[in-house]
Image (tube, rainbow, N blue to C red):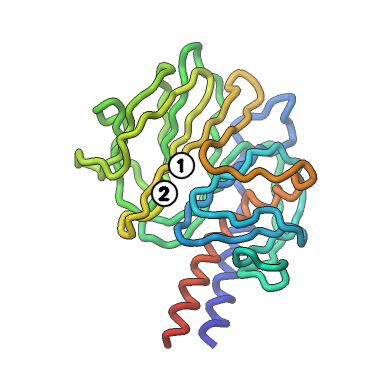
Amino acid sequence: MRKTLSAAVTTACGAALLTTALPAAAATTDDGAGMASLSVLHGVPELTVDVYVNGDLTLDDFAPGDLAGPLDLAPGDYELAVTAADAADASEPVIGPVDVTLEGGTSYTAAAHLDADGQPTATAFVNDTSMLEAGQGRLTVRHIAAAPAVDVWADGAVAIEGLTNPDEKSLELPAGTIEAAVSVSGETDPVLGPTDVTVTEGAATVVYAWGSAEDGSLALATQAIEGMHSAPEGVPTGTTQVPGEQQQGLWLAVGGGLAALLAGGVLMARRQVASSRV
């Protein structure tokens, strides 16, 4: 009974997140009007899943730290289900299926991650694609880790102070390479880094701090968003999974839905383990 109730509660939470509208993009261009530019970051530790859209496998073995996309997508309605990794099909989903809608005219990254207390959650970030002055690049830091407020250091000095989950902060800097590190706010010893980060002229470099400080799983993920003087096009770095041309329409469901369902899936798994111990 407890297992069934946990599943029902988790599904309800996932559906509530899915029906929450994603924030609108700051601007669109003539080339991209009516389309959505989408990337998805998996920042929930210890959860690898398969994602099915309209009954078709769209993301296989989507693992923590993976950044998928970006794609320019037409708006529409799709059915999404998340299964255990390597499931034969979508007939026994971990959560779902649910119907989701993605509206056009957005440029964003959807992240499944942990909140400051270590609970699974989801955040949709609007990517700032506003124009940059010649010789300048944009550095954005997003705190999506189960960790307290942090300070972000650049070349040995605090550049961003007291950043909390799930907030972000952007800086416009001269193009070049900086040595970046992250420390607990008010302290000097780094919990992440130092590491070299390239600030590219006419582009945005987005750095995500994800994972859990308590579990020792803190990590960094990076995303590059190019074309500040034209139609924006995100180019993720690190491990990336991009579906083929025939699957591009299926990616509509991933934006709002995948982040929420990943969060719901790990919560369900935790509750099922707890139920089995009773």
Residue 261 appears at what percent x and percent y? 59, 61
Q: Which residue does the image show at 51% across and 85% down from the upper left?
A: 2
Query: Which quadrant does the N terminus fall into?
Result: bottom right
Left or right of residue 56, residue 49 in this image: left
Residue 103, position as x, y percentages in the image: 70, 45
In this view, which residue lies farthest toward the top?
A: 134
Asked which quadrant contains residue 54, the reply is bottom right
Q: Which mark is residue 210?
A: 2
Left or right: 169, with 122 as reference point: left
Q: Which of disc 2 and disc 1 is earlier in sequence?
A: 2
Contact (CB < 8 A) between labels 1 and 2? yes
Q: What residue type is labelled 2?
A: Trp
Q: Which amino acid does label 1 sit on?
A: Ala
Q: In which quarter of the image is residue 232?
A: top right
The vertical placement of 11 against 114, above or below, is below
Front residue of this view, candidates 179 and 5: 179
Q: In this view, does 10 lie to the left or right of 91?
A: left
Residue lying at 58% horizontally and 46% vertically, measured from the top left: 40
Real-space Cα separation, disc 1 to disc 2, in angstroms: 8 Å
Q: Where's the C terminus, which quadrant? A: bottom left
Number of the label disc, if any, that sits on residue 221: 1
Q: In this view, does 71 lie above or below 175?
A: below
Q: x, y (%) of residue 63?
A: 54, 54
On the rendered structure, is 41 left or right of 33?
A: left
218, 233: nearer the viewer: 218
Q: Name which residue lies at 47% across and 84% down.
A: 276
